[in-house]
Amino acid sequence: MVNIDHIKKAIRRKQKERLASYDPTVKQQEALSLYRQLFSTAVWKQAGSVAITMSMPEELATGPLIDQALSQGKKVLIPKIINKKMIFVEYDRNTPATPGSMGIIEPVSSIEYPKDQIDLIIVPGLAFTKKGERIGFGAGYYDRYLDGYKGMTIALALNRQLIDQLPTDQFDVIIQKVLAPEK
């Protein structure tokens, strides 16, 4: 029997390599396409609160998403890991932030924003299918958080993050909408 964890680990390793070798110009063009698409969706326009991670260098840059949300008066929520649990904390341009336990920038505050008041979560990951399957970074924080979440989930997938098929198990949460760069 094939171990799904070994397959996911191999996909993660390959995806990290693929993302690290992205041509910066191509990545930027794809990112601009994804931002335009997201900002034109009804769910973005209607969302009063948006949860967005602070991106790592190999990921799609989320700074423009955060800036756009703040400029439109949306509440921006950033994930924070506390005692091996992910919460979302309100964030603005004056919020102190520092690298957290995973090395990702997160707010210093630990005041949890209620899950049922988050309108939209932009879900990060290493690989996605157009059907909404995803492989994250392996810690399972988003899958645990999204279990029971009632709002909208969107992933912004660079072309190198789109894969035809991914292994899934009962803990994997399907993303409702996956946006891909326009050709």
Image (cartoon, rainbow, N blue to C red):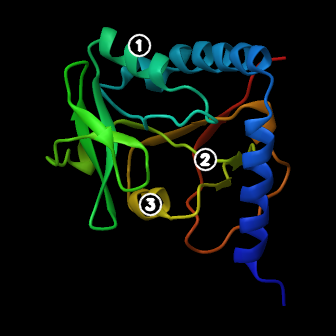
Q: CA distance from mark 3 to mark 1?
A: 25 Å
**61 left or right of 112?**
right
* Amino acid at pointer 2: Gly
Dot 2: few (<14), some (14–19), or many (≥20) neighbours within 10 Å? Answer: many
Marking on residue 68: 1
Residue corresponding to mark 2: 125
* Amino acid at pointer 1: Gln
Q: SS class of the residue under badge 1?
A: helix
Marking on residue 141: 3
From the top left corner, tell me how far across and down residue 62 is, in percent.
50, 26
The answer to which image quadrant residue 32 occupies is top right
Contact (CB < 8 A) between labels 1 and 2?
no
> Looking at the rendering, in which quadrant would you find the N terminus?
bottom right
Comparing 116 with 65, the one in front is: 65
Dot 1: few (<14), some (14–19), or many (≥20) neighbours within 10 Å? Answer: some
* Amino acid at pointer 3: Tyr
Comparing 59 with 52, the one in front is: 59
> Looking at the rendering, in which quadrant would you find the C terminus?
top right
Whichever of callouts 1 and 2 sits on the residue coming sooner in the sequence is 1
Is residue 62 shown above or below 67?
below
Is residue 111 shown above or below 73?
below
From the top left corner, tell me how far across and down residue 96 is, in percent.
21, 31
